[in-house]
Amino acid sequence: MEMEGAFVGKTILVIEDEQQIVEICRDYLTANGFEVASASDGIAGLKLAESIHPVLVLLDLMLPGMDGIEICRRLRLHSAVPIIILTARHREADKLEGLQTGADDYITKPFSPREMVARVQAVLRRTENHPESETEKATAIRLDRDHYRALLPAGEVSLTPTEFDILSILSSQPGEVFSRGQLLNLIRGVSFGSYERAIDSHIRNLRRKVDRDGDNKRHIITVHGYGYKYVE
């Protein structure tokens, strides 16, 4: 396992009730330069997330006390911390539910510890490889990358890192159509194939936030059979 120097000292919070999985995550993450905190039930995990401000949360869906979907929903009320869901549920609908609630990625159990570390590093690179306080000017909106906000004529909205990246890509070239695979490729550096359906969930979340006047195609338009584009 190679240590990723850029992430040394960064705290990952693992909210998981299976101790063996916690220990696997801890071993591989610490070997790659991260610090790891953990909680074995949902209520304690939410409190810990709100108190230590981790750089990323690995979140199990089925937890005692409070399930992962509710934790994700509550965190998203005030935080843009990247969230990767750990789930034993293999149905696509179960995975997409977490993404619709605001998670950035998901990993299906049983998983490769090396893949888990790679996913964590990929998400963090997206959130850290940008100048601080960078404000990107789109056309009708401005994007504040430092705080993951979209500044709209009607006010500002908070976005998750994935939502921010999708909106940034689409709005950087108004009118150009991007396929789901292209969006994944630009965001993650590789297309995950079957994971392309997850883009739809992030787009729905974006529309609820960006098109708050009820016209859910005012900025982000679906090009049926291909993908999405941004328009004025």
Image (cartoon, helix red, strand yellow):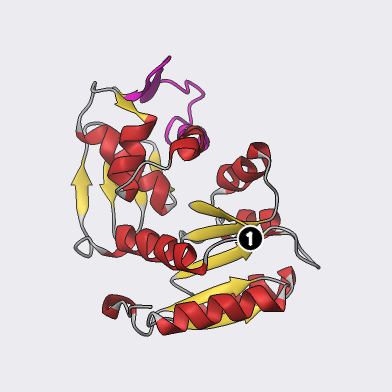
Task: Let me know if residue 97 is in the magenta part.
Answer: no
Helix, strand or loop at label 1? It is loop
In the figure, 13 relative to 63: above or below?
below
- The residue singled out by tag 1 in the image is 110
Looking at the image, which residue is at 49% across and 40% down? 195
Looking at the image, which residue is at 33% across and 46% down? 190
Q: How many marks?
A: 1
Instruction: Provide the residue span drawn in magenta.
Output: 201-229
Looking at the image, which residue is at 39% across and 31% down? 180
Q: Quadrant of residue 25?
A: bottom right
Task: Let me know if residue 220 is in the magenta part.
Answer: yes
Q: Quadrant of residue 155?
A: top left
Looking at the image, which residue is at 32% across and 24% down? 229
Give the position of the N terminus as an image quadrant: bottom left
Q: Position of residue 48 (x, y in %)?
A: 61, 78
In the figure, 58 relative to 194: above or below?
below
User: From where the camera sits, is residue 202 visible?
Assistant: no
61, 100: nearer the viewer: 61
228, 144: nearer the viewer: 228
Residue lying at the far right of the rendered structure: 65
In the figure, 180 relative to 189: above or below?
above
In the figure, 175 relative to 68: above or below?
above
Q: Position of residue 173 (x, y in %)?
A: 20, 30
Indicate left or right for 83 with 17 as reference: left
Q: Position of residue 215 (x, y in %)?
A: 47, 20
For badge 1, the amino acid type reads Pro
Indicate left or right for 168 with 97 as reference: left
Q: Position of residue 80 (x, y in %)?
A: 46, 59
Give the position of the C terminus as an image quadrant: top left
For disc 1, the neighbor class at 10 Å (few under 14, some 14 to 19, many from 20) is few
User: From where the camera sits, is residue 146 visible?
Assistant: yes
19, 9: nearer the viewer: 19
